[in-house]
Amino acid sequence: MSATAFHAESSSLRRLAVAARGRSRVPYLWVTIIAAFVSLVSLVPLGFIAWITIQTGWETASKLIFRGRVGELLINTALLELCTIPLTIVLSVALAWLTERTDLPGARVWAWLAVAPLAVPAFVHSYAWISLFPGLHGLAGGVLVSVLAYFPFLYLPIAAQLRRLDPAIEDAAASLGLNPWQVFFRAILPQLRLAICGGSLLVGLHLLAEYGLYVMIRFDTFSTAIVDQFQSAFNGPAANMLAGVLVACCLLLLGIEVLLRGGERYARVGSGAARPADTRRLGWMIVPALALNVATVALAIGVPFVTLTRWLYIGGAEIWRIDLVGGAFGQTVLLAIAGGVLATVAAAPMAWLSVRAPGRLQRIFEACHYYVGALPGVVVALALVTITVRLILPLYQTFATLFLAYVLLFLPRAMVGLRTSIAQAPVELERAAMALGRTPFQAVRQTTMRLAAPGVAASTALVALGITNELTATLMLSPTGVETLATKFWSLTSEIDYVAAAPYAVMMVLLSLPLTFLLYIQSRRAAGQ
Amino acid sequence: MTFLTIDAIRKSYGPTVALDAIDMTIEAGGRTAIVGPSGSGKTTLLRIIAGFETPDSGSLVLDGRALAGNGSLVPAHKRGIGIVSQDGALFPHLTVADNIGFGLAKKAADRDRRIAELMEMVELDGIMAARRPHQLSGGQQQRVALARALALRPRLMLLDEPFSALDTGLRDTMRRTVARVLRAAGTTAILVTHDQAEALSFADQVAVLRQGRLVQFGPPRALYGKPRDRETATFLGEAILLDADIVSGRAECILGSLAVEPGSTAGQATIMLRPEQIRLTTAAAATDSEGPVGHVDDVEFGGGDCMVLVRIDRTDRAMPDFLSIKCVGFEIPGPGDLVRISVHGPAHVLAD
């Protein structure tokens, strides 16, 4: 290569480098500013709790917090968590083990059926149970329905982790003289710790946040008590202080999970492809194993199915009033899609930064984006109600406030999907596009956006389907006249009109089925299958 | 004395036959390598010995005790056979010390002493004891895996490609360490590998497996020098295969008349020469001495070893008229040079 050619080449390289650096400075700055703004907004509910506590004053606050009612609610909440989570763990580990690692007949079908209860919103689960057993109530009823409604949240990560485990580790344990039971408890279970911790946290947070399920089953938790207070005297300090205790419970759960999880690494050590795991022969154990699966499916899917079919049969054609059901369906779909798009747009800057420019500041912003998803809908709604009533009344009960609540509640869901899809588009592709003469914006649009599009669509859908089944925040914030499937269902069941409520429940289940299937597919793909 | 007897072991997965009547006997204290290309069934055989797979038929006897066959089956955890797998399979949730002590009783009085002893045996520094597997290098992980398997003083140690995930330099070091440690412990070992050089240098008995069949079994030297067939010959190292007529103890081939091993049957056959049996000398002046001459067509320089492509200048025979010959040393001929080809030692006549 001649000297001049070399010079030309190196100067064009330098130009490219300068262009790349320039690009990375300015847009990243703007992206950072937007992400910082979203983080700030996501701190609003927590800031509200702090602000309201200070404003109420210590004396009033302590009077409202340290009273018998709060004690009762705390005991109820603790009992609910302590009974539900261990039961859910045992059930999920057993089901995951059976469907992933044994020769259970029809394992693939059982695996799918173990995820399917997610398609039924928790308050529809309790509606189904109350319809069949009107006497069901209190802690026992709450625990039963909670386990059935939420165990897939634990089943999914545990099953995915079981698929990822290196079977050579189990072989090693067996060659060191451990019998199959010892292998399970000493070599397999410890490696499921992360999945169990993460899934339990998710279940625990749902138990704290759920409203509809426990109202129907007549079991008082903080969420039901806050809504009660809110409905009798809205914006009263009593409800706000209860919300404060509820947030403290959430933070406590988050803290416990961090402690239990520890800073350990459970990934496979070493390189090379793991051999697919062997399936263990069940032998005579096949009978109890099948019985467990059949029983779980019967209780978690069979009961809602039977109830809904029965109510639909009793109601006949006249409960399908197109003006009512169709109206609620249309409104729900519109709200869900708009909310899904908004949440995705709001999460995009942070998701971009966390993939392309991870740093300490970015991690703090990211934590803000994620923590807000741990807050119960009732807390977010209460914060927005109080703030709009006290500071910006024109925004009270408007779509703007409702959408803000949706964005806050589902920000983490949007983040997770966006992050993975952006990470799938390596920055080298953008650089290659720019080297081929595209402007930075064109390069991003033609490579990263193009590659991330399916993932973005999927995460938007996840948020939209979350909104479809959202009850508490929608009840508290929706503008007058707005009725979603969930709120319409709720008002009908409150009037004990179980027959008329059935079509709304069916629509919610049908809308949720794709979500459930998506989760199932994603968890299999995450494990490389 | 026979330690492990593998008798007519068969295993199929659906229509695929993984192992087809494998017979093998292994002496106590010996080191055996099972070598074969991927898909040859070598790992399946190892897993059957370990007890992770059940043979369809055949029997397995270890030191007089039936492990499998005749209706009985001893499960893996009761066999007392140690195993070291490809990437160690260390328990990611346990420290190095706990990994090594995994098979020892939790409350054993001498547990800590035994762990320290094992770490020393595999040349692991004591400060590693508190580390986690992911903080170790590949070689260290394999040392931990070896120590863990040795903790229960197994009579038989299975090594499932334990060196293949390591870098070349480290691989040789580890192989020597493992051989030394096993010899010191008096443990019988079976190594499974697809690397023929590793098999030949590690073992005192080598079994060549191909498509589920045991093709050849014997000491490394015998296998290398006298492979049964073409595939085995080329699998175990570079080989020059020539068509020849065997007439009264000599092979008539493109390289002239070569000595063959005594007892070779007469007739058409394929003979094999190892590259180190052949020497090239620049033959510009020496046209009168014996042996064929040829012209160098191309030289592929490879540092210590070079491949020289020689065109044999003979017209009375058809193919092949090109030979690839490995040359060692610094007197490598250049393209176009006239070279003389001399052969040392007898040629090996392949059975088929």
Image: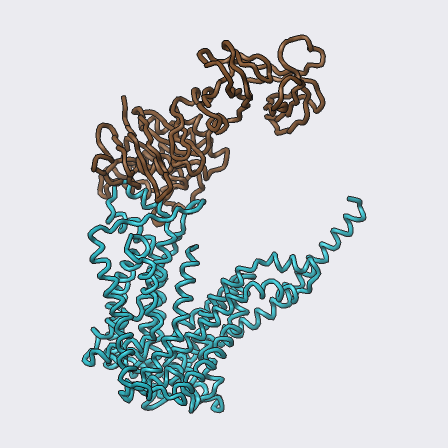
Chain colours: A cyan, B brown
Q: Does residue A238 appear in the picture of this structure?
A: no
- In the rendered image, residue A251, in percent from the top left (x then y), is placed at 36, 70
Question: Could you tell whether B79 is left or right of B90 in the image?
Answer: left
Q: Nearer the viewer, residue B56 or A523?
A: B56
Q: Nearer the viewer, residue A296 or B135?
A: A296
> Residue, x 24% and y 45% (percent of image)?
A179
> Residue, x 26% and y 35% (percent of image)?
B80
Residue B203 vertical placement versus B76 (above, below): above
Residue B266 vertical placement versus A138 (above, below): above
> In which quadrant of the rendered image does the N terminus of chain A lie?
top right
* Residue A390: quadrant of the picture: bottom left
- In the rendered image, residue A503, in percent from the top left (x then y), is placed at 34, 82
Q: Nearer the viewer, residue B271 or B157?
A: B271
- In the rendered image, residue B341, in percent from the top left (x then y), is placed at 62, 16
> In which quadrant of the rendered image does the C terminus of chain A lie?
bottom left
Q: Does residue A359 appear in the picture of this structure?
A: yes
> Residue, x 41% and y 90% (percent of image)?
A323
